[in-house]
């Protein structure tokens, strides 16, 4: 794979991942969406299908890492780091593009949601009715969850551990069952396996933090949230932003270490 193939494949694939994954969060969250209040099961399966779709689109071009934690784990597994910056660049750019496309697709719903007094509490309010006090204190706006993750209970050590554990599960599944014949990305069957693992992680481990398990998936859309001209959007919760970046990277490294010791 050339550097241009890697960059283009990861950009397109990650954009699709975030468009569909962020899209299901928007569908469940936003006022005037036909899927509003459809629940956590919908979100978990929506993200799983998003992973599957993105993998099958990007796989032939870049190997479909779509996640810096996957890129780091494969680099540790193989000892090959030369393409890591290219993968990272495509993943983070793609995540930002995908988040912007969610905003475009749900433009009217974002406006209706963020100008509804029952939701934002009045002109200039920054919080949802359900978590008004906590959201204002922590700087998390009422639609931030469409773009990035956040904890139900704020405890840095627990939140970090949850992200590490979830990512270890994901990467062990990728490394032991999901790689293509060359071992440098996800294969055809690996895309389906990984999608189902993501659903499982969401249902079993997603409750505490929203299961980022992917630094690009969280940081790229969080930056877009900070930049978009959304009325009453509130803060982007930068105090928490390091956890869904650092946790998955640690988890990816641990999973690669386990793989090299136990499976290689």
Image (tube, grey):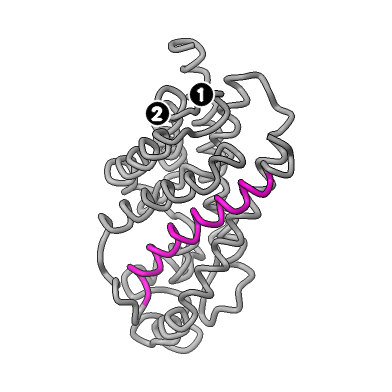
User: Residue at 61% across / 55% down in the picture?
Assistant: 94
- Main SS, magenta region, reads helix
Along the horizontal axis of the image, is 103 left or right of 29?
Answer: right
In the image shown, does 164 or 234 lie closer to the viewer? Answer: 164
Residue 173: which numbered mark, if any? 2
Quadrant (top left/top right/bottom left/bottom right) for the N terminus: top right
User: Residue at 43% across / 43% down in the picture?
Assistant: 159
In the image shown, does 16 or 201 lie closer to the viewer? Answer: 16
Q: Is residue 255 above or below residue 213?
A: above
Q: Is residue 14 magenta?
A: yes
- Nearer-N-terminus badge (2/1): 2
Residue 142: x percent and y percent? 43, 71
* Residue bearing the label numbered 1: 181
Q: CA distance from mark 2 to mark 1?
A: 15 Å
Q: Is residue 56 above or below residue 165?
A: below
Residue 39: x percent and y percent? 26, 62
Q: Is residue 206 above or below residue 167?
A: below
Report whether residue 243 is seen: no
Residue 78: x percent and y percent? 61, 19
User: Residue at 29% across / 76% down in the picture?
Assistant: 34
Q: Nearer the viewer, mark 2 or mark 1?
A: 1
Callouts 2 and 1 close, C-beta under 8 Å: no
Q: Is residue 218 magenta?
A: no
- Label 1 Cα crowd, 10 Å radius (few <14 / some 14-19 / many 20+): few
In the image shown, does 44 or 149 lie closer to the viewer? Answer: 44
Which stretch appears magenta?
7-30
Q: Secondary structure at mark 1?
A: loop
Residue 28: which numbered mark, if any? none
Numbered marks: total: 2
């Amino acid at each position: 794979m050339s550097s241009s193939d890697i960059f283009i494949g990861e950009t397109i694939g990650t954009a699709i991942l975030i468009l569909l994954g962020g899209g299901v969060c928007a569908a469940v969250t936003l006022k005037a969406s036909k899927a509003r209040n459809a629940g956590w099961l919908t979100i978990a399966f929506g993200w799983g299908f998003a992973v599957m779709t993105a993998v099958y689109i990007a796989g032939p071009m870049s190997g479909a890492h779509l996640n810096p934690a996957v890129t780091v784990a494969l680099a540790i597994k193989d000892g090959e780091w030369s393409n890591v910056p290219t993968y990272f660049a495509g993943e983070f750019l793609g995540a930002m593009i995908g988040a912007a496309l969610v905003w475009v697709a749900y433009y009217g719903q974002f406006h209706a949601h963020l100008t509804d007094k029952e939701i934002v509490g009045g002109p200039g309010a920054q919080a949802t009715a359900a978590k008004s006090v906590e959201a204002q204190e922590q700087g998390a706006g009422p639609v931030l969850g469409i773009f990035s993750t956040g904890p139900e209970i704020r405890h840095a050590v627990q939140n970090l551990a949850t992200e590490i554990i979830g990512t270890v599960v994901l990467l062990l599944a990728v490394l032991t069952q999901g790689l293509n014949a060359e071992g440098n990305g996800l294969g055809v069957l690996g895309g389906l396996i990984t999608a189902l693992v993501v659903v499982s992680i969401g249902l079993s481990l997603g409750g505490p933090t929203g299961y980022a398990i992917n630094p690009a998936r969280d940081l790229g859309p969080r930056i877009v949230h900070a930049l978009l001209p959304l009325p009453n959007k509130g803060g982007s919760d930068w105090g928490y932003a390091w956890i869904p970046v650092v946790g998955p990277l640690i988890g990816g490294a641990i999973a690669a270490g386990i793989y090299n010791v136990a499976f290689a």
